[in-house]
Image (spheres, helix red, strand yellow):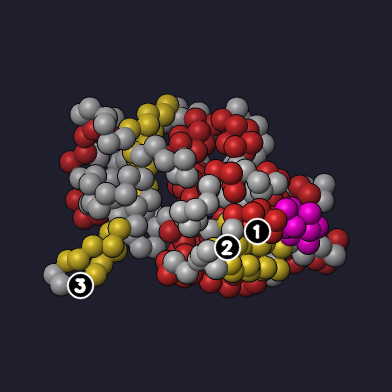
Amino acid sequence: MVAEIIDGKAFAATVRGHVADHVARLKEEHGITPGLAVVLVGEDPASQVYVRSKGKQTVEVGMNSYEHKLSADTPQKDLLDLIDKLNNDSAVHGILVQLPLPRHMNEDLVINAIDPAKDVDGFHISNVGLLGTGQKSMVPCTPLGCLMMLRDHHGSLSGKDAVVIGRSNIVGKPMAQLLLGDSCTVTIAHSRTKDLPDVVRRADIVVAAVGRPEMVQGDWIKEGATVIDVGINRIERDGKNVLVGDVHYESAAAVAGAITPVPGGVGPMTIACLLANTLTACCRANGLPEPEGLTA
Ligand code: GUN
């Protein structure tokens, strides 16, 4: 079997197109422009790249982008004061504090200071609890992107065996909750799981989010399974820097029914879902119907 390649780049462009259409209607019919505030503390180069990309794509879909850059030695109190200001700013519908934060800051405390209704990352403890109990919440962007691709590929996910490899708060745990919400039978596997290849071999859907380059091998994959590779690992190969996922692509693609490549799979969906979440937050804040197909 040669796997169908799930093109995340194209899918993300479609999602951004839906968001842009909805934003245009909001402006025309209600005079409302969704606004996303992104806060960056410090000069981490990777974070700077992400934040720039978020700002650019926010403007491209017709939303307002507010960037706040604070120096690495900013006192935590100043960051909390800024969050309070953004919480109370009616032009701001989404707030994202780029992680990681400098070591003198308490990430949990900072994230939980964001108004849960504006928490477009879905990291606030209230949103985690709402998702865990199947209630309306803000959903973390990367798992939401994976869910959208899976729904698009399969239609219904009901009754499928899903194995999520990785138990992070940002991807693994919310991914498992979302798959459970779509009536999958879900296993969360991790670095201590016994007989991991055998566990993965049972899965109709594999979501790999462990952060280990090319760990999941083709002979772990059930014939025809769908493989979603969340990993983005920079490794050196033949003297060159290359990006690889958590899945060994060539061997897995020879067995799987469908697979996301790295790059060009899950990655582009994350920012697209951030924009979708900002739009959803804006609609909820204004008592308007939520966009269809852009939420869990
Ligand atoms: N740093 C790396 N990924 C993310 C993300 O999805 N959200 C935030 N806030 N910070 C990040």
Residue bearing the label numbered 3: 240
Specify which label sits upstream in the sequence, 1 or 3.
1
Magenta-colored stretch includes residue 31: no
In the displayed image of the protein, which residue is found farthest to the right?
30
The x, y position of residue 264, in whole percent, is 39, 63
For label 3, the crowd category at 10 Å Cα-Cα, with few meaning under 14, some 14 to 19 and many 20 or more, is few
Task: Please tell me whether mark 3 sits on a helix, a strand or a loop.
Answer: strand
Which mark, by number, is residue 74? 2
Range covered by the magenta-colored residues:
84-94
Q: Quadrant of residue 44?
A: bottom left
Name the amino acid type tagged 2: Thr
Q: Secondary structure under badge 2?
A: loop
**Viewer-closest of 75 and 198:** 75
Q: Which mark is residue 78?
A: 1
Of the two numbered discs 1 and 3 in the rendering, the one whose residue sits closer to the viewer: 1
* Residue lying at 13% horizontally and 70% vertically, measured from the top left: 238
Query: Which comes sooner in the sequence, label 2 or label 3?
Result: 2
User: Is 144 on the left or on the right of 190, as rendered?
Assistant: right
Quadrant into which the C terminus falls: top right
What's under tag 1, amino acid-wise?
Answer: Asp
Asked if disc 2 is less than 8 Å from ligand 1, the answer is no
How crowded is the residue under tag 2: few (<14 C-alpha within 10 Å), some, or many (20+)?
some
